[in-house]
Every structure is written in structure tokens, then in C-alpha cells.
Amino acid sequence: MPQTRRALLRRLAIGQAEGRAPSMMGAVVRGGRPVWTGARGSVAGEEPHSDVQYRIGSITKTFVAVMVLRLRDAGLLRLADPIGRYVEDTPVPEATIAQLLAHNSGLAAEPRGPWWERTAGELRPEPADLFGERPQRLPAGRRHHYSNTGYALLGALVERLRDGEAWGEVLRREVLEPLGMRRTTLRPLMPHADGWAVHPWADALLPEPAQDTGLMAPAGQLWSTLDDLCRWAAFLLRGDERVLSAASLDEMRTPAVPPEHDGWDAGYGLGLQLVRRNGGRAGGAEGARSGRRLAGHTGSMPGFLAALWVDTEEDLAGIALANCTSGTAIGAVAGDLLEIVADREPRIPEPWRPLPGPLDKDLLALTGPWYWGANPFALRLRADRALELVPLSGPGRASRFRAEPDGTWTGLDGYYAGETLRVVRTEDGSADHLDLGTFIFTRGPYEPAGPVPGGVDVEGWRV
């Protein structure tokens, strides 16, 4: 709506003016396509358009993570495997691939030597050149510690398991081309923005170098455009089976490390930052804990800032790009663009439709009320033979379950994530009770004849 578009443009204009960015671009994606784009400032004397490249910094890590998950889905590795099994001469051979993806391997944040983002990659020609005398700063698996060097190892992992092919070529062939992202590259292509530093006490500019960072490139090398990042946001929201399974994409958005700061307002999945925001309103720690859940990444390289956030519940994404080294809260701009639309034009639910047939009557017979002790729950049937367990009164442990080939179900979230749900049947084949990770659910509350652990008082319920 016009009022929403004006609010979006105003937020972008405030970000560019107060952040003193030579140029800033923004976009909102909904329903798998961009629904708004905007630009302020200039590139080479003209207002930038959505095909102008900007450097996107650590958003690069989201692409690397997708390639690693593709290798896992192809059976070429397990996330629990130690990186030393595949990459030689690593200082943390026992750190797992999952720990590297989630930044809890304990590796140093930066490589040794001068500021890697402003110096040529030739200064570190071999993997051993990335690490100093104390490469591991924390015990592996204990705490979140952001590590650019960890993603350098993940890039080497991709090359090792793709028969020595450069990770950038693997990315182009397996990810970028299927998604139509032809303007996302390792080196800048015209037209592109130049990177600038802005003087802290004067409105003056200084050019920033755009180095090829060599072995550190998987941590932040990529250049992209607003158009291409809209395609990437649509992928992160809705998936694309040609690139990555929906289950693996959901795994990337699942917290993999403990919360940071006071309360759950920031965390990390597998290659994705996870944050909570209070619906665009200032709200402090309590608001952050109850606010909107976003996944994505921010990025910075000398001369550039970038941010991309997605909200799967609203099917929305916000993107912001700027060509300045610092001064602009780019993550807040992208998040605010998303929330302006979410607050002013909430998502209209998809039309309800019945399950695709034929209907499995045995599964339908499982639905309805079940009781864990005296606590009532409902079991609902979803698409693809999936089940959902929800409490009917008071607090309770809800979870979704994926159907398995052996007739059981596996929990996908909440307390029962990874746990097995099985139906225990009587001799005539009818469902007797549910066994969910040793928790027994019966058709009635504490049925005397039911298989309730510890038994039920023979006199039953009383007043």
C-alpha cells in the first residue's frame, strides 16, 4: 500500500542519512518475490539500481553452509565428523563440521597476520598460514565464538570433497545457477559500487581496498546485487529442492549453540544468525525474548555493509546494502524494513485445503485426544503422514513428527526433537497406546487397564 511504501522509503532514507552512507539500497521479499525496492544516495554519480553489485561480507557464510549441507545430504560426510578427517594440517582436527558451521569450534576469530580483510590473500598462501601460535581460544563445543577462520576450513572441505574444484566454482554450478543468481561473484563485475570509509568528524570519504582474500574468501568474499539477494532470500524462506532439501534448510535455522547475552535474543544455527526482535518497537530484554524470530546474516568488509533477514512465519525478508565501512546499523535497517511490512500488512494465510488423497484410515484413527497421565493432548494428522501433538489445557510439550519408513515417527522440534513416537497395537491390530520416548499416552486419563508405568490405583478416581 502507498503508506507502507512511504514508510519503507523513509526508513531507508533515515538509515542512509544518519549512517552517512554514500549509497544504500533496500528490498522486501514476500511470496517468493521482491515486493519493494528502494535506493538512496549515488554510485558513480547516479542512483543505484538493483543490478549494481555490493560486497556482502559474511552473508557469504550462508552460501558455504548450504554447500556443506549438500555434501551431507549426498552422504559424503556427517556433521559429527571431525574436520581433520577431510582437511589436512588443521590446528583443530577433532572439531566437528557442525561446530565449525555454528561457530563453537573454539577457533580464533581472525587469521594471523595483518588485518585480513584489507590485505591480499597471497600473504597466507597455505592453510597453515592462517593460524597463529594459539589457534584455538576456547574448548570446542562449549561456547559460541565467531570464527572467520572456521569458514576458511569449511571452504577447504568443499574443495576436498568436490575433487579439488575451487569452492567458488562449486558454488556457481550447484547453487547460484539453479537459483538464477548470475550476478553473485567472487570478484566485482561492472556495474558495482566502490567501497568507502567515512571520516568520523567530517563529511569526507576515503577509498577502501577491495582485496582478494584468498583462502579466507569463504568467510566473506562474495559480491552480489539486490536482485540476486532477493532470490537468495526467497530460497532461505521457501527452499528449492534442486539446491537443498526443506529439512536441511530447517536444520540451518535451528539454534545450534547456547544463547548469547542476557536471554535468547541472539544465537546461531548452521551458517545462519538467529535473532529475536520486538516487532519493530523498542522493548528491552523482555520484548526481545517474546518478539519476532528472524534468521539470516549481517556482513561487513572494508567499504561495505550488508544484512539479510527472513521471517518464515510471515514469509517475509528484509535486505539492506551500503557502501561504507561503518556508521550504519545495517542489520537494524534490514530488520525494520521487514517489520514495517509485517506490522502494517500482516500475512494473509494460505487457503485451507484438505489433505491430498487417498486418506489413510489407519492414520486417521490415531487422531484425537490422548492422555499422558491426566494431561490431555490432541494428535493431528498432517500432510505426508506427518503427525502433530499439541496440549489441550495448560502447559505441555508440543511437537511435530516426521513419518519414517519403518512405521514410526521422529520428533522435529521442542522437547521431543529426535525422539521416536511409535504406536503399540493389540493383537487385533488396533492402537492400544503411544510410546513417545518412554512416555506412555493412553486414550483415557489414567485408565485402570492401560499400560501406565507404575500402575493405576485399583479403586480408580474418587471424590
Image (spheres, grey):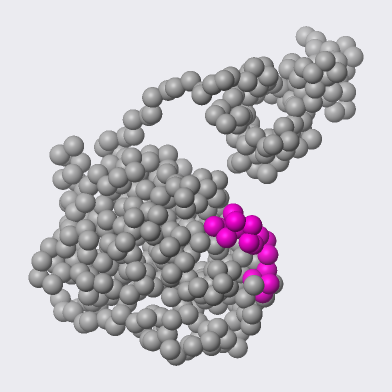
Residue 262 in view, yes or no: no
Image position of 35 (left or right of 88):
left
Q: What residue is rendered at 55% in x and 83% in y?
A: 127
Q: What residue is rendered at 82% in x and 15% in y?
A: 428
Image position of 25 (left or right of 460):
left
Q: What residue is rendered at 68% in x and 69% in y?
A: 82
User: Which quadrant of the view contains residue 403?
Assistant: top right
Q: Which residues are magenta?
A: 69-85
- Residue 390 horizontal/vertical position (percent): 60, 28
Q: What residue is rendered at 54% in x and 62% in y?
A: 68
* Residue furthest out toward the top: 463
- Up-down relation of residue 12 to residue 412 (above or below): below
Viewer-closest of 133 and 291: 133
User: Number of marks in the image?
Assistant: 0
- Residue 314 horizontal/vertical position (percent): 38, 39
Q: Quadrant of the C terminus?
A: top right
- Residue 346 horizontal/vertical position (percent): 32, 34
Viewer-closest of 172 and 301: 172
